Image (tube, rainbow, N blue to C red):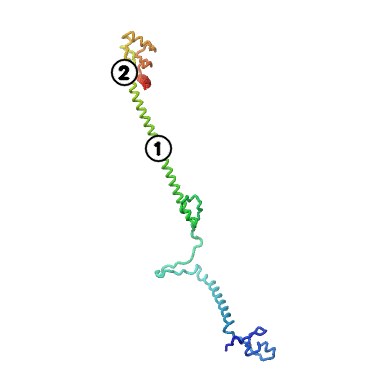
Amino acid sequence: MAIETDDLSTCRHGMTYDASQHDGCVVCRREAGGPSVAPVQSVPEAGTSGATRIIFGAMAALVVVVAFGLVLPKLFPGGPPDIDADADATEGAPRRGLAVDEATPAARPAEVDPSSPLFRRGDPRREESRGGGIDLAAARRDEAAQRAESQERAAADQRAEADQRAEAAEEAAAGQREEAERRNAGLVRARGRVRITVYTTSWCPHCVRAKAYMEQQGIRYTDRDVEASDANGAARARLGSGSGVPAFDVEGEVLVGFSPGALEAAITRAAARHL
């Protein structure tokens, strides 16, 4: 029969007894010379007995947890299996585990300082980098693309400048050609105004050849035979340089003997003075 909690008492020996039936524990009754009856050993069903059950239950749960922690690693060396969330997966499909290769940790985007030269002013990635990491490789690729674009623009500018210089040189050369053509045309016209006097004789073959050349080239001249008149002989004598024939007076420049090159040069010099 259960003992009411209100009837239990504790004596000075620290033992519990039923106060409704005894005056103390067995030791107290022996000391008092009373009957020796075994102390009450029953545990009350309420009050202190509930707390005791809670304590014993917690201790048992702790033992189970410790045992589970010691046994589980031996049963699953790679970790517990993952529960496949896909209920429609075909039977026999491999199940995914939770094992992670710690030797190769997941790559993490590198953080880049927004003040880095990898970013141009106004680049939206400046704002993005403030809130977290950014792919440095992508930033470097963008920088390389921008550098290549800048180099291409510089090369295009250099080509355009070279084309402009070539065009200016061509224009200058064309101007020089036009000037030369105008000068040549002026010389041609001026050559017709050059006064040329040639002193000859009838028997001189060089005189015949010189007159034939000037007639072929359209050079106007005045022929004076030094043997035909004393005046022509006197005029030839005033030229100096001996008495040889043919002798040319090209507006004051005297040539003795016939040379096509020397004659043409003297005519050109005289024509240039008319320009």
Residue 93: percent from left, percent from top: 41, 68
Does the CB distance between marks 1 and 2 fall below 8 Å? Answer: no
Type of amino acid under label 2: Arg
Q: Position of residue 271 (x, y in %)?
A: 36, 21
User: Dividing the picture into quarters, in which one does residue 29 lie?
Assistant: bottom right
Q: Nearer the viewer, residue 60 or 1?
A: 1
Q: Position of residue 235 (x, y in %)?
A: 36, 11
Provide the secondary structure element on which disc 1 rests: helix
Left or right side of 128 for 32: right
Front residue of 14 and 104:
14
The picture quadrant where one finds residue 247 is top left
What residue sits 64% from the left and 89% below the top? 22
Between discs 1 and 2, the one toward the N terminus: 1
Quadrant into which the C terminus falls: top left
Residue 151 vs 250, above or below: the answer is below
Provide residue 163's location: percent of width, then percent of height.
Answer: 39, 38
The answer to whether residue 81 is above or below residue 271 is below
Q: Residue at x 37, y 31 (%)?
A: 175
Q: Residues within 10 Å of mark 1 (few under 14, many from 20)?
A: few
Q: Is residue 153 above or below residue 83?
A: above
Specify the label residue 40 is tagged with. none
Instruction: Indicate the amino acid at tag 1.
Output: Gln
How packed mark 2 is, by other alpha carbons closer than 10 Å (few <14, some 14-19, many 20 or more), is: some
Q: Nearer the viewer, residue 260 or 13?
A: 13
Q: In this image, 204 relative to 4: left or right?
A: left
Instruction: Tell me the distance, in whole angstroms, between the alpha carbons under discs 1 and 2.
Output: 48 Å
What is the secondary structure assignment of the residue under circle 2? loop
Which residue position holds label 2?
A: 220
Query: Which residue is located at x 68 percent, y 91 percent?
Result: 34
Q: Which residue is mark 1?
A: 164
Q: With 237 as the anchor, is 98 left or right in this view?
A: right
Q: Residue furthest front?
A: 122
